[in-house]
Amino acid sequence: QVQLVESGGGLVQAGGSLRLACAVSGLTFSSYAMGWFRQAPGKEREFVARISWNAVTHGVTSRYADSVKGRFTISMDNAKTTVYLQMNSLKFEDTAVYYCAAARIGTQRYDYWGQGTQVTVSS
């Protein structure tokens, strides 16, 4: 059974930092890419970042939404069971529920989703 459990959300002042974690079980990073999405009140869910593990090169590939480039960093731990989203220089407009999700490598369809964690940035 696949489970994605997010943690690390909270209230932070603008300019501050938070690190979100997504504990993953039931799938392997050699087959699935991991993404972070967010949904602000009254808005549609939007892509934030994605990371995929390359079992051949033993490296990772990551990409980001333009709105977070240079401020957010996605990573995975060496045990390949947790994905992180380091968020720096947070802005009020980063306030949202953040979700992690898993998509088979080579696809853009995310098959599995976590329950989300709230991030609130005070201005």
Image: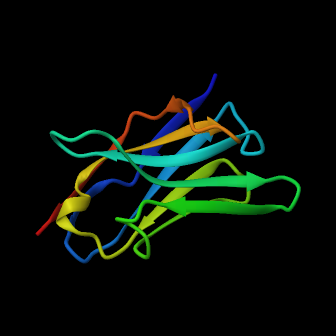
Q: Residue at x 21, y 41 (%)?
A: 43
Count of number-bearing discs: 0
Q: Is residue 66 left or right of residue 83?
A: left
Q: Is residue 63 left or right of residue 46?
A: right
Instruction: Tell me where residue 112 appears, x and y as whole percent.
Output: 54, 30
Residue 5 or 87: which is nearer the viewer? 87
Say whether residue 115 is visible: yes
Residue farthest to the left?
A: 123
Instruction: Tell me where residue 101 appears, x and y as whole percent.
Output: 51, 39
Q: How is the image coloured?
A: rainbow
Q: Residue at x 73, y 54 (%)?
A: 53
Q: Residue at x 27, y 39 (%)?
A: 44
Residue 19 or 45: which is nearer the viewer? 45
Residue farthest to the right?
A: 56
Residue 24 image-quadrant placement: top right
Q: Is residue 72 above or below residue 106?
A: below
Instruction: Tell me where residue 11 appears, x and y as whole percent.
Output: 21, 59
Which quarter shows the C terminus? bottom left
Q: Residue at x 73, y 60 (%)?
A: 78
Instruction: Tell me where residue 84 appears, x and y as whole percent.
Output: 52, 58
Say whether residue 75 is visible: no
Q: Is residue 5 above or below residue 13?
A: above
Which quarter shows the N terminus? top right
